[in-house]
Image (tube, rainbow, N blue to C red):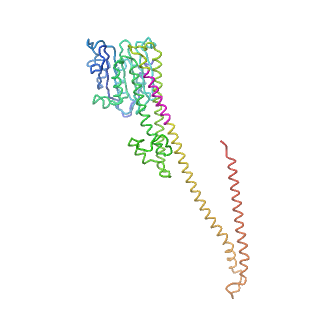
């Protein structure tokens, strides 16, 4: 039934690029050889035209011949590495999809579909179909690490034949572009191949390749989370400028990356005691980008932990693996348990980083809100000062207005004043009318102001009482 997935449409790159880079590793374990040599460990590049020949061990890639000096062939590993030339990581090179590589290497029909699951997957298959692990002739793993180019190791599909002790595998996801030119693998491909080379005595064990794949993935995840990602979190804390715990007082020790060192000097939220609005906007973008990266990265250690548990359960529950090929299961159990703990530590760090970034975002929003409140308070103070000035003008106007009114009234033609003296004998009438009228005006203004102030206080108190309680 799973073969129906083999015909499922595969995602393609939008740039139309469908070719890839290819390389291979062959590691053969002979009974009389105890060391790695160029005879039993071979790696090199492959042209697309050679993929079928290598997969089926034809022509120059034929199976190794029996040599009395080396002894009998006990088993080994054959891996085909592939990397799409496009930057679209989910793409499977067209040559692989159209070839019979899966059949030649005895790999599950779900391999290519599994490699396109960005969230990661791990499955096991047995041959013949429906047989259990203890009685099957062959078993296969399909691993697809979560898509995060900084720490993903792509996908690994492997099959082990218990009768021959040979493991065949297809790996898509390692950087092989320069490898095809120099015949030397780059990291992380170099890391995985070196690990295989160092485990000469275990080349015949069915769990060697899955274990090394998990080790390599765990190391890449740990390096990304504890170095690049954590440094970016510290950078955000430095730029916001509130949190000081857990940081060096010398920024050049925290930011060895030149890009981060430049940001550390140019994007600070505060210059002195003043909040920089443009930097605040850029920090919101930077923190949200970092939060998104952390969310994408959380899946990587979680996948490794789940995958380790999956393999450990198989190892602990199988009598077949207890001493397979005279290799004690304890040696693999110890490695897998450590890798699980190693990945759990990475998961703890990334969770802590997520909490720290969330805290910095809260601090940033709070700082912006406080700055807005301070600006509003400054505007309110300015408004109060303007209001005070207007009150003073109003009081002065109120003091002079009655006198001006009386003087204007007395200067009208309706009154006739004797002109034999500069000051009229009736000048006292002006004071009798103007002074009481001025006093009455000022008293009325004061009573009105007191009434308005009390009314404002009652309204503010009523609004406080009517506020809904959380």
Q: Is residue 369 left or right of residue 220?
A: right
Residue visible at 57% across and 59% down in the picture: 382
Q: Is residue 347 magenta?
A: yes
Q: Is residue 58 left or right of residue 375?
A: left
Q: What is the quadrant of the N terminus in the image?
A: top left
Q: In this picture, which residue range is highlighted in magenta?
A: 334-353
Question: Can you name the residue that lies furthest to the front here?
Answer: 249
Compared with residue 195, is residue 417 higher up or lower down, i.e. above or below? below
Residue visible at 70% across and 64% down in the picture: 446
Compared with residue 81, is residue 245 higher up or lower down, i.e. above or below? below
Residue 313 percent across, percent down from the top left = 48, 19
Given residues 62 and 351, the one toward you in this image is 351
Q: Is residue 71 magenta?
A: no
Question: To which quarter of the image does residue 170 belong?
Answer: top left
All told, the count of numbered labels is: 0
Residue 405 percent across, percent down from the top left = 68, 74
Residue visible at 69% across and 81% down in the picture: 413
Question: To which quarter of the image does residue 184 belong?
Answer: top left
Residue 279 percent across, percent down from the top left = 46, 48
Given residues 300 and 115, the one toward you in this image is 300
Given residues 380 and 37, the one toward you in this image is 37
Compared with residue 450, is residue 126 higher up or lower down, i.e. above or below? above
Question: Can you name the residue that lies furthest to the bottom here?
Answer: 420
Q: What is the quadrant of the C terminus in the image?
A: top right
Given residues 222 and 175, the one toward you in this image is 222
Compared with residue 116, is residue 28 higher up or lower down, i.e. above or below? above
**Magenta highlight: main SS:** helix
Residue 396 percent across, percent down from the top left = 64, 69
């Amino acid at each position: 039934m799973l073969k129906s997935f083999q015909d499922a449409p595969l995602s393609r790159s939008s740039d139309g690029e469908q070719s890839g880079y290819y390389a291979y590793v062959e590691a053969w374990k002979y009974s009389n050889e105890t060391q790695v040599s160029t005879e039993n460990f071979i790696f090199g590049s492959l042209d697309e035209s050679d993929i079928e020949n290598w997969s089926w061990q034809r022509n120059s890639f034929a199976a190794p011949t029996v040599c009395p000096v080396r002894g009998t062939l006990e088993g080994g590993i054959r891996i085909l590495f592939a990397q799409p030339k496009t930057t679209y990581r989910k793409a499977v090179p067209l040559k692989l999809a159209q070839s019979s590589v899966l059949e030649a290497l005895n790999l599950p029909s779900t391999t290519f579909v599994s490699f396109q699951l960005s969230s990661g997957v791990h499955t096991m298959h047995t041959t013949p179909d429906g047989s259990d692990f203890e009685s099957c002739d062959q078993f296969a793993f399909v691993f697809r690490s979560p898509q995060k180019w900084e720490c993903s190791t792509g996908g690994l599909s492997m099959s082990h034949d218990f009768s021959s002790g040979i493991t065949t595998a297809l790996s898509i996801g390692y950087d092989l572009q320069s490898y095809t030119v120099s015949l030397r693998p780059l990291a992380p491909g170099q890391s995985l191949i070196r690990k295989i080379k160092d485990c000469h005595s275990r080349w015949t064990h069915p769990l060697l390749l899955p274990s090394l794949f998990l080790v390599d993935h765990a190391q890449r995840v740990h390096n990304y989370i504890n170095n690049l990602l954590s440094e970016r979190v510290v950078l955000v804390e430095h730029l916001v400028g509130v949190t000081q715990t857990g940081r060096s007082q010398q920024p050049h020790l925290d930011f060895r990356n030149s890009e981060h060192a430049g940001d550390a000097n140019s994007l600070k939220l505060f210059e002195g005691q003043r909040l920089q609005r443009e930097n605040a906007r850029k920090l919101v973008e930077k923190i949200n980008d970092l939060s998104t990266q952390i969310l994408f990265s959380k899946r990587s250690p979680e996948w490794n932990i789940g995958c380790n548990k999956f393999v450990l359960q198989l190892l602990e529950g199988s009598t077949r693996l207890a001493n397979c090929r005279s290799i004690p299961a304890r040696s693999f159990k110890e490695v897998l348990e450590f890798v699980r703990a190693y990945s759990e530590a990475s998961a703890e760090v990334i969770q802590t980083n997520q909490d720290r970034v969330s805290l910095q975002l809260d601090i940033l929003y709070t700082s912006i809100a406080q700055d807005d409140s301070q600006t509003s308070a400054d505007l309110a103070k300015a408004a109060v000062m303007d209001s005070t000035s207007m009150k003073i003008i109003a009081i002065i106007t109120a003091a002079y207005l009655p006198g001006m009114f009386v003087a204007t009234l007395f200067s009208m033609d309706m009154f006739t004043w004797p002109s034999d003296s500069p000051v009229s004998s009736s000048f006292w009438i002006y004071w009798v009318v103007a002074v009481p009228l001025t006093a009455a005006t000022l008293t009325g203004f004061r009573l009105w102001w007191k009434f308005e102030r009390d009314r404002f206080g009652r309204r503010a108190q009523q609004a406080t009482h009517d506020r809904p309680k959380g």
